[in-house]
Amino acid sequence: MADKPKTPADVYELVSQHDVRFIRLWFTDVLGHLKSFSINSSELERAFERGIGFDGASLTGFNSVEESDMVARPDATTFSLLPWRPEGVDAVARMFCDIEVPGGLPYEGDPRWVLKRALKRAEEMGFDDFVVAPEVEFYYFRSAKPADGIPEVLDEGGYFDLTTLDAGSDVRRETVLALERMGVPVSSTHHEAGPSQHELDLMASGALGAADDLMTSRIVVKEYALQQDWHASFMPKPLGGANGSGLHIHQSLVKGGVNAFHDPERPALLSSTGKSFIAGQLRHGREIAPLYAQWVNSYKRLVPGFEAPVYLSWSRRNRSSMIRVPQRQVSEEGDSWAELRCPDAACNPYLCLAGMLQAGLEGIEKGYELPEPMEENLYHLGPDEMAARGIEQLPSTLGEAVELAADSELFLRTLGEHTFRRFIELKRQEWDKYRVQVTPYEIDTFLPVL
């Protein structure tokens, strides 16, 4: 679509122009699973004016049976055709929705609303927007349920490979074209370090649009893989001996129409605002970990040796740090960004970005001091040396992370009381189910000798 719609009137015109028969209303539950129901195009006016009611009792993290009535109100600016559905006659489109309770008030358990609240805080502090540019990694596999329990990759390619080993390059190309037709601009793509692993780099945009784009990207990647009878996975660590799939997020605040992280007079061109923002994310990085590393599997990615961060530090070049401030070319004057490297590709992007923003704003509001950068490879330092330098480590398990979050005032303020209680409950349940499992590793290693 050449121009994104801005108003319901724009949507009505596009529906008529493209003979759209069905509109899928998209939203996410608290865990970031994409949910959808479809309405006939004849219901569009009612959807915009009053919203469409649905039963939220069966959705993870939504209200209980006693108060399950929910209302989905579509956001006209997110309208786009679904390129994998028939075009020309009875076409299908989608719109993201804000979830409300009857009466029109926002539903506190809507992840989109959680991010909007964080953005409202930034606005009240004088910032125009929180701009992010996500880099999302994923794998292509032969099947979602491999017969021997080991996912079967499609190639043995590596980082930036352009060979016949890259079996997914054509599918990746079709995916990018589909995303661009949906209004999701992709700046670059490439084969990643793992076998059959790929990366999509999205263009920078405001955080709310970026979260919508990430949800769109995940479903589009999966749809076009399915056309080849493949399975695309954003699982954080699907292969034990290969890199996990990260969601590296380049971020900056905008104030007065300019990048608030940039100061040409300071080292690394990083302003005092940028330094305090980064300091906030470092200080609160452990307690908000379940927002960017949401699953039990997430913590198998956050280990030394696989290019994922483990320590709460920052650097200009060192990719073992949690935050990197990339050095810019002369042509990129005025363009300072901080890259957060700990999120993984399977997080709920609305909650992840909300937590990132709230932690950074906390640093600005309270004037946190940024420690010195750590440019050496932190994986080579021993525990005693790390302790002597005062460098903390990210949580090593979901269980540890959830209990830190449960005691965090910032985590509570970020999610709000309703979502906080439900999220903590769900994550404790996940950890309890996981930790009682007996794995093949334990059987193979211990059963013969114990």
Image (tube, rainbow, N blue to C red):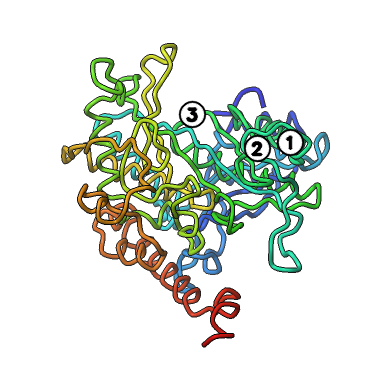
Q: Which residue is mark 3?
A: 204
Query: Is residue 426 shown above or below 321?
Result: below
Q: Position of residue 398 (x, y in %)?
A: 41, 64
Q: Which comes sooner in the sequence, label 2 or label 1?
A: 1
Q: CA distance from mark 3 to mark 1?
A: 23 Å
What is the residue that sits farthest to the top in this orientation? 331
Task: Report crowding for label 1: few under 14, some 14 to 19, many 20 or more residues within 10 A (C-alpha).
Answer: some
Q: Position of residue 11 (x, y in %)?
A: 62, 33
Task: Report crowding for label 3: few under 14, some 14 to 19, many 20 or more residues within 10 A (C-alpha).
Answer: some
Secondary structure at numbered mark 3:
loop
Question: Can you tell which mark lies on residue 169?
Answer: 1
The answer to whether residue 102 of the structure is visible from this angle is no
Q: Which residue: 38% across, 35% down? A: 324
In this view, the residue in front, 356 or 33, is: 356
Q: CA distance from mark 2 to mark 1?
A: 8 Å
Is the residue under label 1 in contact with that under label 2 (CB below 8 Å)?
yes
- Relative to 266, 438 lies left or right: right
Query: Is residue 313 shown above or below 34?
Result: above
Question: Label 1 amino acid?
Answer: Ser
Q: Which residue is mark 2?
A: 191
